Amino acid sequence: CGIPGYEPAVNGPDDVATLLPLLKKHGLAMPSLHVGSTMHKADEAERSIQTAVAIAEAARPAGLKIMVTNPSPIKWGGAENKTDAELQTQAQTLD
C-alpha cells in the first residue's frame, strides 16, 4: 500500500527484537514508536523509565528517532482522577 514506515506500541525490548527482522523483511522504517508508562507512582515510574530506555536502545538499530509516551491513567476507562500528590510525582518523574 506504499506505507514507508511503521509506528508500533511496544511493551518491552523483546517486542523490538521480534519487530526488527519483520521491518527489514518488508522494507519498513520505524522512526518512532509508542511506549506506555506509569509515572504517578514513584516505584513504578523507575521501572517505566528503565523499560523505556531499554526499548530505545533495542530500537536504535531500526533508526528510532522519537519515542512517544503518555503517562497511564489510574484506570483505563475509569473516572478516577490522580491526586495532587500523584500528579506532583508524575511531573517530577517526567522531568
Image: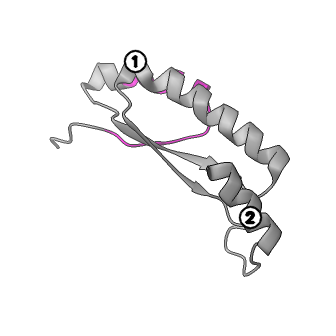
Q: Viewer-proximal residue, 11 or 37?
A: 37
Relative to 4, say whether 74 is above or below.
below
Q: Residues within 10 Å of mark 1 (few under 14, many from 20)?
A: few
Q: Earlier in the sequence, mark 2 or mark 1?
A: 1
Q: Position of residue 35 (x, y in %)?
A: 55, 44
Relative to 24, say whether 6 is above or below.
below
Q: Which of the 4 image quarters holds residue 15?
A: top right
Q: Which of the 4 image quarters holds residue 21?
A: top left
Point 52% across, 22% down: residue: 57
- Compared across the picture, whether 83 is left or right of 66 comes to right
Q: Position of residue 84 (x, y in %)?
A: 78, 74
Q: Residues within 10 Å of mark 2 (few under 14, many from 20)?
A: some
Mark whose residue sits in front, 2 or 1: 2
Q: Quadrant of the N terminus?
A: top left
Q: Viewer-proximal residue, 59 or 20?
A: 59
Give the number of marks: 2
Q: Which residue is mark 1?
A: 61
Point 75% across, 38% down: residue: 47
Q: Which residues are magenta?
A: 6-22
Q: Position of residue 55 (x, y in %)?
A: 56, 29
